Image (tube, helix red, strand yellow):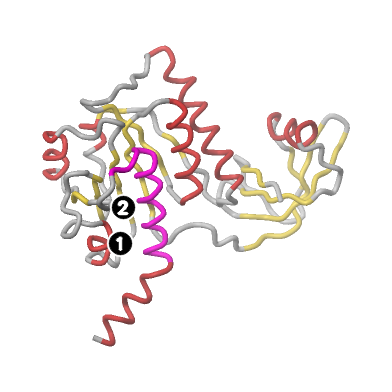
Amino acid sequence: MQQYFLDQSVQCHETVEMNEEQAHHIRHVLRMKENTRIRIVDENQCVYFAHVLYENEKTLAYIEEAFDAKSESSIQIRLLMGLIKQEKWDYCIQKCCEAGVNEIIPFVSKRSVVKIKEDKNDSKLKRWNKIALEACEQSKRSHCVAVAPAMSLKEALNLEADLKLIAYECADVKGMNLASVLRKNPHIQSVLICVGCEGGFDPSEVEEAIQKGFICVSLGPRILRAETAAVSMINYLTYHYDMLEESYENAEEIN
């Protein structure tokens, strides 16, 4: 079932008009017949079943009923991601949205190869957010992930969260692995994760991150590509806090 995000609030038994891009997708890409059922997510992240109606040139959705989608993680995850080459960057946005990230914040660091020209900032940001929107629709998220404008790593490290993690290939695999760090932080509401570009981090950048409250974590004995590291961390975080937190609490009670 196809899903669409609306930038307005809706109510049951209300008819709303789809925007131009959505209308084109419904009419000409998917060629939906009238009364085809779709999912609608409004600006309040409320999810509804609806069906398609056509009225002359207008493409409408009749809101049938609301339901609890339960598609979001129990924690807020923001990703600080070093800019990487376009194809890999597009993949990273798409898969991180599917995995459950809430916001993606690109940054430029000392080893960044990719730079953004000032005159292309707006067009690139628009494209990135379209990729995020489509990924959230495809994965039936009730939250539409925002991709922020690129900033410097120095600026990004000033952002706050209950838990702040930086993936670093030189971190101790046994003593600083992601799993052990998460077990020591069972009750958090938000997490900020930082992943470097293709060349990783300069040691001075890691030191600055530590001074800003970040914890260095290892993702295992193998070196992962930047985009793989980001998706892996988000997958592990959502699984840990959504599926395993209760089992950890029960284990603590037994002990």
Give the number of the disc on residue 50: none
Whether residue 237 appears in magenta in the rendering, the answer is: yes
Across the whole image, how many numbered discs are drawn on residues? 2
Q: Which residue is mark 2?
A: 191
Whether the residues at callouts 1 and 2 have beta carbons within 8 Å, the answer is: yes
What element does badge 1 sit on? loop
Q: Residue furthest bottom?
A: 254
Q: Which corner quadrant of the image does residue 230 belong to?
A: top left
Point 66% across, 47% down: residue: 3
How far across and down, in percent of the image, does residue 173 sit? 20, 55
Residue range in magenta is: 223-242
Determine crowd level at label 1: few under 14, some 14-19, many 20+ residues with C-alpha closer than 10 A: some
Point 34% across, 38% down: residue: 226
Q: Identify which residue, 86 or 107, lies in the foreground.
A: 86
Q: Is residue 26 left or right of residue 104?
A: right
Whether residue 233 appears in magenta in the rendering, the answer is: yes
Q: Which residue is mark 1?
A: 188
Q: Is residue 26 above or below residue 181?
A: above
Q: Residue furthest top?
A: 119
Quarter of the image for the C terminus: give it: bottom left
Determine crowd level at label 2: few under 14, some 14-19, many 20+ residues with C-alpha closer than 10 A: some
Give the residue type at disc 2. Val
Give the residue type at disc 1. Ile
Q: Which corner quadrant of the image does residue 158 belong to?
A: top left
Task: Label the magenta part by its dominant secondary structure.
Answer: helix
Point 24% across, 45% down: residue: 166
Q: Is residue 174 above or below residue 227?
A: below
Q: Is residue 65 left or right of residue 228?
A: right
How far across and down, in percent of the image, does residue 105 sit? 36, 36
